[in-house]
Amino acid sequence: MLYDGDVVLGDLGNDTYVKDTFSTKRYTSAVINSFGHAVPMVAGQLQSTGKQAKAVTVRTEFSETRDLWEIYLTRAYAVPDLEKLTRTFIFERNGGGRVEIIDRVKFKGPQPQTFGTAIILGKEQKRENADGSQFTVRGKQRSVRVEWKAELSGEEKDPALTLTEAPIIGIVPSERSHGTRVGLDFKTPVTEATIHLIITPLP
């Protein structure tokens, strides 16, 4: 996320270039695979690779005050019980602006599955002013607030999310972590659920 020219939430960039970066071991790097990106983890699985795993645009809406982009991500995960996964980006320009990211998942069953999403922090970034449903992330000069809420549509009763942090290790395991994956996961497996992330610039 770019705020007044300051990258507050962004991609980690390139991993170290070594022989394994260009071999079959390429996707063992958490910088390159989806662990190091702000995307869902579905039934404990990262995204698949290859053109068959591409996202597909479902709908778009653009106006002077609001942009919406919804994509179909189901093919990106090799999870047999995954019936549908979509991600919607909403950019609101009014009131100082905000970005909302909505992940909606549905499993075929018969058993519920684990599900969660993530925020990626750079090497020097930390969560600040955290409480049960939000935290602040600082860039070089600007900061944003990250809030979340969760909803269940299945028979599960507890929509609470658990927050975890994990280092993002690249293709060279001995190197320093490239950043931190902040995971936001349902405490219990789900059959149908939604996670909303709301990112708001701070003065």
Image: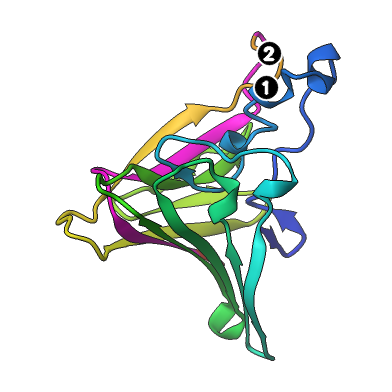
Total of numbered circles in the picture?
Answer: 2
Q: Does residue 193 lie above or below 185 as drawn?
A: below
- Residue 43 seen in render: yes
Are the residues at dot 1 and dot 2 in contact (C-beta closer than 8 Å)?
Answer: yes
Q: Which mark is residue 170?
A: 1
Q: Is residue 192 magenta?
A: yes
- Residue 201 falls in which quadrant of the image? bottom right
- Residue 202 seen in render: no
- Residues 74 and 41: in front is 74
Q: Does residue 94 lie above or below 87 as drawn?
A: below
Image quarter of the N terminus: bottom right
Q: Does residue 177 lie above or below 193 as drawn?
A: above
List x then y, in percent, for residue 60. 65, 80
What residue is shown with label 2? 175
* Kind of element beneath mark 1: loop
Q: Is residue 177 magenta?
A: yes
Amino acid under disc 1: Gly
- Residue 180 falls in which quadrant of the image? top right
List x then y, in percent, for residue 51. 74, 47
List x then y, in percent, for residue 167. 53, 26
User: On the rendered structure, is 112 left or right of 158?
Assistant: right
- Type of secondary structure dominating the magenta stretch: strand
Image quarter of the C terminus: bottom right
Residue at horizontal 17 percent and vertical 55 percent from the top:
156
The mark that comes first in sequence, 1 or 2, is: 1
Residue at horizontal 70 percent and vertical 44 percent from the top:
11
